[in-house]
Image (cartoon, rainbow, N blue to C red):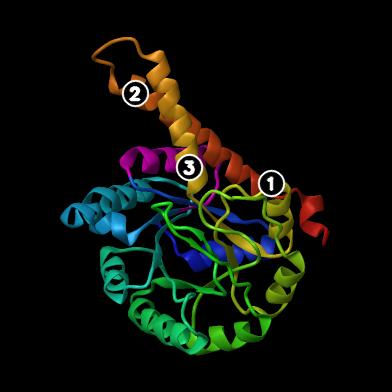
Amino acid sequence: MLTSLKTVLVDARASRYAVGAFNCTEDVMARTILETAQSLSAPVIVMLLGDDLESGGGAGWIYQVEPIKAAAARLDIPVVLHLDHTTDLAIIQKAVDAGFSSVVIDGSALPFDRNVELTRAAVEIAHPKGVDVEAELGHVGGMDLADRECAESVLTDPDEVTRFVEQTGVDALAVSIGTAHGVYRSQPKLNIERLDQLESISPVPLVLHGGSGTPDGQIRVAVRHGICKMNVYTDERQAMWRGLRRAAASIDRQDPLPSEMFGPIKEELARLVAEKINLLRLTPSESESGN
């Protein structure tokens, strides 16, 4: 069932687990993500990027959004349809009109006051239609999607959290505690002390961007200390690349069936999605532990 971001994250925060949020650009990805989550009886967040939706003359709004909404309506797990990072209020409006559950407005590269202004404008578009808003405070750096430019990360300042949430009305807050987008150049070390400070004062659930490549042990500690949603994309692309190489190596006919070409890709992606969902589910003893 299609549901709100706030609904799944409030439950995750109360029960000390995190919900996997997976980027999706093709129907093979959407089907694999949804089928895997359904098989594990897990809530899932399917994320779409504005650039992908707008490409091909806006075809993504039809070929990506509508099939996901139709599939979600037939599943018995909570499915959040989520617009990933954008700074464009026009894209926010289109997502709201298209029936998204939630949107991310990313003003994290802006000064605090301008981030507030942009985020509040997104909330004013989304909330009247029942659409939740996630924003980012601090800045998660790393490589861009083209793997050409690298931005520095700026840790979230605890002194800004309450003011930001109160002045914007956001429903979830992505924080910067040491992760980065893209492939890591060196192993990250999450700042759990900073996360504890943020969790203790945040009126809304906390989100971790740049989850791909972060060591599993650090992820589980972050969930124990308050992370309720983790974004994954780079790991998905790497899994699909492994599947593509498997398919290319195993096919020896000139007219392979689609199942032969896409089967290994789906298998690798399904394995990755299942691993991430299970990673974010803590045992009762872990949930109770503060370490």
- The amino acid type found where label 3 is placed reads Glu
User: Residue 144 sits in which quadrant?
Assistant: bottom left
User: Residue 263 sits in which quadrant?
Assistant: top left
Magenta-tinted stretch: 26-45
Q: Earlier in the sequence, mark 1 or mark 2?
A: 1
Residue 257 sits above or below residue 278 on the image: above
- The amino acid type found where label 2 is placed reads Met
Give percent across and percent down for residue 109: 47, 75
Q: Tell me the distance, in whole angstroms, between the alpha carbons under discs 3 and 2.
A: 17 Å
| Residue that badge 1 annotates | 216
- The amino acid type found where label 1 is placed reads Asp
| Residue that badge 3 annotates | 236
Residue, x 69% and y 80% (percent of image)?
A: 201
Residue 85 sits above or below residue 47 on the image: below
Residue, x 65% and y 45% (percent of image)?
A: 279
Q: Which mark is residue 116?
A: none
Q: Which mark is residue 261?
A: 2
Give percent across and percent down for residue 104: 43, 68
How many other residues sit within 10 Å of disc 1, few (<14), some (14-19) or many (≥20)?
A: some
Most foreground residue, 288 or 55: 55
Q: Quadrant of the C terminus?
A: bottom right
Q: Are marks 3 and 2 in contact (CB under 8 Å)?
A: no
Give percent across and percent down for residue 197: 73, 76
Provide the secondary structure element on which disc 1 rests: helix
Specify whether 62 is left or right of 155: left
How many other residues sit within 10 Å of disc 2, few (<14), some (14-19) or many (≥20)?
A: some
Most foreground residue, 289 or 222: 222
Give percent across and percent down for residue 272: 54, 38
Provide the secondary structure element on which disc 2 rests: helix
